[in-house]
Image (cartoon, rainbow, N blue to C red):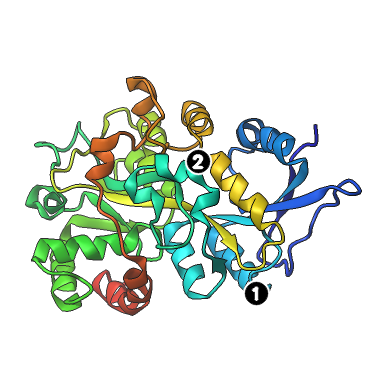
Amino acid sequence: MPRLKSLTLSSLSTLALLAAAPAGATTFTISWWGFNGDKLQDIIVNPFQEMCDCEVVFETGNNGDRVNRLQMRSGAGVDVIYLTDSYSQAAIEQGLFQPIDRAQIPNIDQLYDLAQAPQGEFGPAYTVGRIGLVYDSARVSPPITSWNDLWREDLAGMISLPNITTTSGPMVVLRAGAHAGVNAFEDADAAFGALAELVPNVVTNYNTGSEMINLFSTGEIAVSMTQDFTLNPLRAAVPTIEWAQLEDGEIAVLNTLNIPVGSENVELAHQFINFVLSAEIQQQLAEQGVDAPVNTMVDLTPEQASAWTYGADQIASLHRIDYSQLNPARTQWLDRWNETFGM
């Protein structure tokens, strides 16, 4: 069985390098992050290679690097690409993706509604996460139950927020707008006014998940805003960490699958997306700790489900972000954010 071939992208690389495939074999190129390589080899790559009689090769790198290189190649060189919804929206606006043919992806019909067509005619989401609040229950009482609790006086000097340049950072502005009773896209002045009121509670803004975890570990903070994949390492570092049960809901983060305009294997790309969305593969990915499922046919035990954004009720409670508005707003908000926090 052919093993996974990884085409690592560095910030200095210019064009993706395609690994040589056996004579006569179709080369199918996937762009993704490269995490959980061994598990994905067993769950996805090996069985798909058997199905397609093709050689699967990879480009790896962060979202921004991979979108930039796809743009440099005018959407060529990759057959299917994994991205968070913020970056897939940017790529759509750059004309780098082609609409998908849903008739070739019947498993889309088994997905939660928010995953089926998160960006219109383009690709589906294959997993869902959430952004919420975490707190150290040994130091914070009463428990946090709302985004508005960030403004509580008893939390002065106890909070770290994600910087606006991170995935979660712009959501702080949106929640500040909600706290002020406005839509931040329509009334940025009111949103940043509420953000200024929050400053006394904020020790620092973090740039990476590991930085945030370290701030909890050293006792410098007791509250933060983060994505749910950080919960297990947070609890390993500080066992009294709790994920806040927010009465005003959490924010959805979707990872999408799309077909670039220059794909040389469009039919295979549709087959691959359908394969990844199948209940069988989604079940394995969830059980092996790789991704939260979006296929409604997946059935997890309470213990398995505790690690994920899972179940119809939880999925329905999530707030979706319109990145066609957020992406340009982030740029407009950057200077005001830096002024607010004295950066």
What residue sits 47% from the left and 74% below the top?
93
Which amino acid does the dot numbered 2 rest on?
A: Leu
- Considering every residue shown, the one lying at the far front of the view is 103
Cβ atoms at labels 2 and 1 below 8 Å apart:
no
Position of residue 91 measured from the top left corner of the image (x, y, whole percent): 51, 69
Q: Is residue 187 above or below residue 23?
A: below
Position of residue 295 measured from the top left corner of the image (x, y, whole percent): 41, 37
Position of residue 113 measured from the top left corner of the image (x, y, whole percent): 33, 47
CA separation, marks 2 and 1?
27 Å
* Closer-to-camera residue (256/333): 256
Side of 286 where 321 appears, left or right: left
Can you tell which of label 2 and label 1 is closer to the viewer? 2
Q: Is residue 272 above or below residue 322?
A: above
Q: Residues within 10 Å of mark 2 (few under 14, many from 20)?
A: many
Side of 278 where 116 appears, left or right: left
* Closer-to-camera residue (13/300): 300
What residue sits 44% from the left and 66% below the top?
89
Side of 11 where 172 appears, left or right: left
Q: Quadrant of the N terminus?
A: top right
What residue sits 48% from the left and 32% below the top?
279
Q: Is residue 2 among what the camera can see?
A: yes
Residue 228: quarter of image: top left
Which amino acid does the dot numbered 1 rest on?
A: Ser
Position of residue 88 measured from the top left corner of the image (x, y, whole percent): 48, 62
Q: Which residue is mark 2?
A: 277
Question: Circle 2 sits in a helix, a strand or a loop, which is it?
Answer: helix
Side of 178 where 237 appears, left or right: right
Circle nearer the N terminus (2, 1): 1
Residue 74 is labelled as 1
